[in-house]
Image (spheres, rainbow, N blue to C red):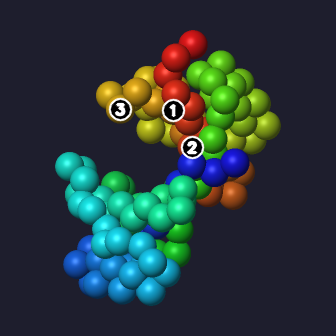
């Protein structure tokens, strides 16, 4: 159901030290820093991403956090976004769209403010 989990950090090098060690303990490899400055860890099909919050505020529990939900198609992403905004969610970031990496994504905040994204491959 989920595509990834993203959490915030105020110190990515400190986070790298901690997560490199904890993933190694599980048999995983060290994290990689992507072009956007996020640490990315992959292990057994799961992906954890760590970033400084894009809103410029300090990271706190869930500030900078995103829960990613897998969708079967772009049409499902659009339906998810429409249903969410119709039932108390707030559209955030950019409108649902294809990204340069070939995924089709939409972002919402749920009624409690949790950040969610649905994504699928862009082929329609």
Q: Do the residues labelled 2 and 1 touch (CB within 8 Å)?
A: yes
Q: Which mark is residue 57?
A: none
| Rendered location of residue 33, percent (x, y) | 24, 60
Q: Tell me the CA gap for discs 2 and 3.
A: 15 Å
Q: Tell me the CA gap for discs 2 and 1.
A: 7 Å
- The quadrant the C terminus occupies is top right
Residue 93 location, quadrant = top left
* SS state under label 2: strand
| Above or below for 117 versus 121 | below
* SS state under label 1: strand
| Above or below for 73 versus 16 | above
Q: Are marks 3 and 1 in contact (CB under 8 Å)?
A: no
Q: Which of 69 and 87 is in front in this view?
A: 69
Q: Which mark is residue 105?
A: 1
| Rendered location of residue 80, percent (x, y) | 70, 31
| Above or below for 120 versus 36 | above
Q: Name the residue located 66 percent from the left edge and 29 percent from the top edge.
A: 72
Q: Residue 101 carries which label?
A: 3
Q: Which of 96 and 47 is in front in this view?
A: 47
Q: Earlier in the sequence, mark 2 or mark 3?
A: 3
Q: Earlier in the sequence, mark 2 or mark 1?
A: 1
Q: Name the residue located 32 percent from the left edge and 28 percent from the top edge.
A: 100
Q: Tell me the CA gap for discs 3 and 1.
A: 11 Å
- How crowded pointer 3 is (Cα within 10 Å; few <14, some 14-19, many 20+) is rated as few
For label 2, the residue is 117
Q: Name the residue located 56 percent from the left edge and 36 percent from the top edge.
A: 119
Q: Name the residue located 69 percent from the left edge and 41 percent from the top edge.
A: 89
């Amino acid at each position: 159901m989920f595509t990834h989990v993203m959490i915030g950090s105020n110190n990515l090098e400190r986070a790298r030290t901690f997560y490199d060690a904890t993933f190694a303990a599980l048999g995983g490899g060290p994290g990689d820093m992507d072009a956007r400055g996020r640490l990315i860890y992959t292990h057994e099909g799961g992906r954890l991403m760590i970033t400084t919050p894009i809103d410029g505020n300090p990271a706190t529990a869930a500030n900078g956090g995103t829960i990613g939900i897998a969708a079967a198609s772009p049409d499902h992403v659009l339906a998810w976004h429409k249903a969410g905004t119709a039932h108390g969610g707030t559209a955030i970031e950019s409108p649902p769209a294809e990204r340069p990496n070939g995924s089709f994504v939409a972002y919402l905040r749920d009624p409690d403010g949790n950040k969610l994204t649905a994504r699928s491959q862009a082929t329609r």
